[in-house]
Image (tube, helix red, strand yellow):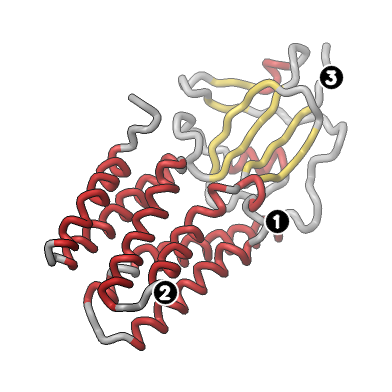
Amino acid sequence: MSRWFHPLTCIGGLLLLVSPFFLFVGHEALGIGLMVLAYSLAGLEFKKYTSDLQFVMLLLSATAIGIALDLLHNAWPLLTLTMFLAAFATIARQKYMQHFTYVNLLWLDSGMAVVAVASYLILIFQAPFSWELSLAPLIPIGGALGLTLSYVQDGLAIRRSVSGGYQVTEGQAAPELELLDEDGATVRLSDYKGKHPVLLIFVRGGLVPRLPHDASDLREQACGIPATRGARARYRAGRHQHQQVHGGAYRCWFPDTQRQ
């Protein structure tokens, strides 16, 4: 299966393509409803794939909702900008994770979401009541606010957990670690002693779905970093000695200094 074939997102793209037809023939509520459904379908796969396909679909569908509402309620371009801001707040941290990480710029995407909420509230209180104006923006704006506030919560928890420094020091011998690989076989750190360095990468959330072993306790034992929302583990060879927290991935690089 193609890496670009994400079923729900592709269905959402088709719905987004046909939605303008219903606007032109006078079925505005149906057209806007299809746009909201397109956004929702892409959002359902946002966590699973986190790819450019979801990023583009969320931006396009949210902007389309804003344009349609602006044209219907003569509010151009306020609703368009509001919806675009909500969608961008949703994808920004994942798209630019190397800059944001899980602990940096917490104010930026959450601030965009708060501005989108404030703009939405001002608009609906000023405009005459309509169902599409009141309900259509709720999923993009509510999703952006909830997601970005969860980033703030997690980011602050990570900062507190490492505020006293790390338990791992340079040159310290790694404890014995034991994990299940993707085939269910047991892999021990000592199996690689004297062969080559080993890099353990502990990734937050479900970003490594084929490894079902919960490594939260292992991460705390090895790195001294408390679990926040569970973890998955994987390993690969490495050549450097380093301990780092970056982008939500907790990396413990054990040195190749104890060969036998």
Locate residue 203, reporting x and y percent. 58, 40
Q: Which three-letter amino acid code belongs to the residue tagged 1?
A: Ser
Q: Residue at x 49, y 53 (%)?
A: 91
For mark 1, give the secondary structure: helix
Residue 60 appears at what percent x and percent y? 38, 53
Q: Is residue 198 above or below residue 101?
A: above
> Does the CB distance between marks 3 and 1 fall below 8 Å?
no
Label at residue 258: 3
Q: Which mark is residue 78?
A: 2
Residue ID at (77%, 28%): 254
Could you tell me which secondary element the residue under label 2 belongs to? helix
Q: CA distance from mark 3 to mark 1?
A: 30 Å
Q: Is residue 135 left or right of residue 180?
A: left
Quarter placement of the C terminus: top right
Q: Residue at x 56, y 59 (%)?
A: 151
Indicate which disc, 2 or 3, sits on the residue closer to the N terminus.
2
For this rendering, which residue is in front, 199 or 69?
69
In the picture, measured across the screen, residue 203 lies left or right of residue 42, that is right
Nearer-the-camera pick, 191 or 240: 240
Q: Is residue 230 above or below residue 81?
A: above
Measured along the vertical axis of the image, is residue 30 above or below residue 243? below
**Is 119 left, or right, of 169 in this rendering?**
left
Assess whether mark 3 and mark 2 are in contact (beta carbons under 8 angstroms). no
Which comes before the other along the chain, label 1 or label 2? 2
Which of label 1 and label 2 is nearer to you? 2
Q: Nearer the viewer, residue 31 or 110?
A: 31
Q: Could you tell me how far apart the alpha carbons at marks 2 and 3 are, in whole angstroms? A: 63 Å
Q: Is residue 258 above or below residue 108?
A: above
- Residue beneath label 1, please? 161
